[in-house]
Image (cartoon, rainbow, N blue to C red):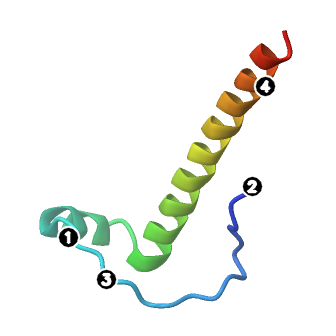
Amino acid sequence: MKPAITHQSHKRPFNLLLNEGTVKQARSFTNNLSATVDLLLADYVAKRYEELLAIQNLVDAVAER
């Protein structure tokens, strides 16, 4: 199952609890914290998906022996 990550996806508000100091520092690097967090989260999900796919491929290869 491929993750549903597209830039055209509908956006809606979510409440997150973030470290106040980290947020203050991040705001000095970006004017759009929501877009930055969204991009980082999408990257995280894509990497985890690739890891799961690699594990599944390994399991499948072992099962074929």
Q: Amino acid at mark 1?
A: Lys
Q: Is residue 58 visible?
A: yes
Front position in the image: 42 or 29: 42
- Mark 4: give few (<14), some (14-19) or many (20+) Cα within 10 Å: few
Q: Tell which tag, 2 or 3, sits nearer the viewer.
A: 2
- Mark 3: give few (<14), some (14-19) or many (20+) Cα within 10 Å: few
Q: Earlier in the sequence, mark 3 or mark 4?
A: 3
The residue to which callout 2 is attached is: 1
Q: Is residue 61 above or below residue 26?
A: above
Q: Earlier in the sequence, mark 1 or mark 2?
A: 2
Please tell me in which quadrant of the rendered image residue 34 appears: bottom left
Q: Is residue 40 above or below residue 35?
A: above
The residue to which callout 1 is attached is: 24
Q: Amino acid at mark 3?
A: Asn
The residue to which callout 4 is attached is: 60
Tell me if 20 is positioned left or right of 48 in this view. Answer: left
Residue that appears at 36% across and 65% down: 29
Residue 55 x/y as whole percent: 65, 29
Between the residue at mark 1 and the residue at mark 4, the CA separation in whole angstroms equals 46 Å
Please tell me in which quadrant of the rendered image residue 62 appears: top right
Q: Mark number for residue 15?
A: 3
